[in-house]
Amino acid sequence: MPRVKLQRFQDNASRPDIIEPGKPEYEQLGGRWRTDFFQEPYPLTLEVGCGKGEYTVGLAQRHPQRNFLGLDIKGERIWRGSTRAEEMGLTNVGFVRMRAEALAAQFGPGELSEIWITFPDPRPRDRDIKRRLTSPRFLALYEQLLTPGGLLHLKTDNEGLFEYTLETLAARPGARVERFTRDLYAETDAEFTEAQAIQTNFEGKYRAVGVPIKYVQFRLT
């Protein structure tokens, strides 16, 4: 393992804002994140597949009276998010290293107020449908962990995943799409401002070559 990468893993092991396998708190915070992990018991927002944490940190900066967690399986990625949050002096943001499939082991029923899914792997092959982060399998998991009426957001550059998500929501009893667009940055209505406010490096690269960003905001109950 390269020395820099090894050092970052060692940093993660000592940072209190990162929860990962091997730490005593791992799998012990379910239902108690707001009170036992964060300094203030503010409403909790989760970003699933946070990558380098750009969105999680950006949201935490914009909303100091909310708590934010970024979830990703890659330790080096969340090291970057943690480093950025530390440099900015943010105390309402943290990171957890785990797979999205194991969410129920980490969070209690109704513990989350909001979920962001930003530029996930579209899993285009039919055999991978159940691994899409907006598949019925994951929607059922999100519904369990969200407060009733909690918001979910999807941002993606992938047309196939976007259309699949709309179709899946249309077929799901109780689900309600609040708003959606096939070209987020062409929208001028204030209702899209929050989704436009933060732009990841990945997102910027797609916009630079003319790929429109798709967005949908929805509720499951």
Image: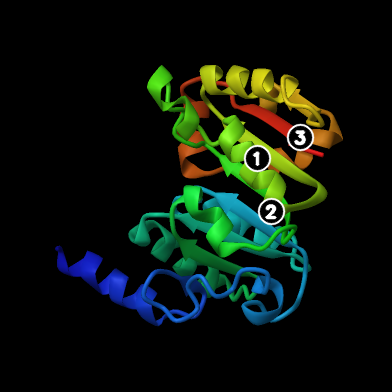
Label 2: few (<14), some (14–19) or many (≥20) C-alpha neighbours in 10 Å: many
The reply to whether callout 1 and callout 3 are in contact (CB within 8 Å) is no
Q: Which residue is mark 1?
A: 140
The reply to whether callout 1 and callout 2 are in contact (CB within 8 Å) is no
User: Which residue is found at the position 65% from the left and 81% from the top?
Assistant: 36
* Amino acid marked by disc 1: Ala
The reply to whether callout 3 and callout 2 are in contact (CB within 8 Å) is no
- Front-most of residues 187 and 136: 136
Label 1: few (<14), some (14–19) or many (≥20) C-alpha neighbours in 10 Å: few
Q: Earlier in the sequence, mark 1 or mark 2?
A: 1
Q: Which residue is mark 3?
A: 218
What is the C-alpha distance between the residues marked 3 and 2? Answer: 15 Å
Q: Secondary structure at mark 2?
A: helix
What is the C-alpha distance between the residues marked 1 and 3? Answer: 14 Å
**Position of 43 relative to 206 (above/below):** below
Q: Is residue 186 left or right of residue 95?
A: right
User: In x, y percent, where is residue 219?
Assistant: 78, 38
Give the mark toward the camera: 3 or 2. 2
Q: Is residue 70 left or right of residue 178?
A: left
User: In x, y percent, where is residue 113?
Assistant: 76, 55
Q: Is residue 80 among the parts visible in the rendering?
A: yes
**Position of 175 relative to 210 (above/below):** below
The quadrant of the image that shows the N terminus is bottom left
How are the residues colored?
rainbow
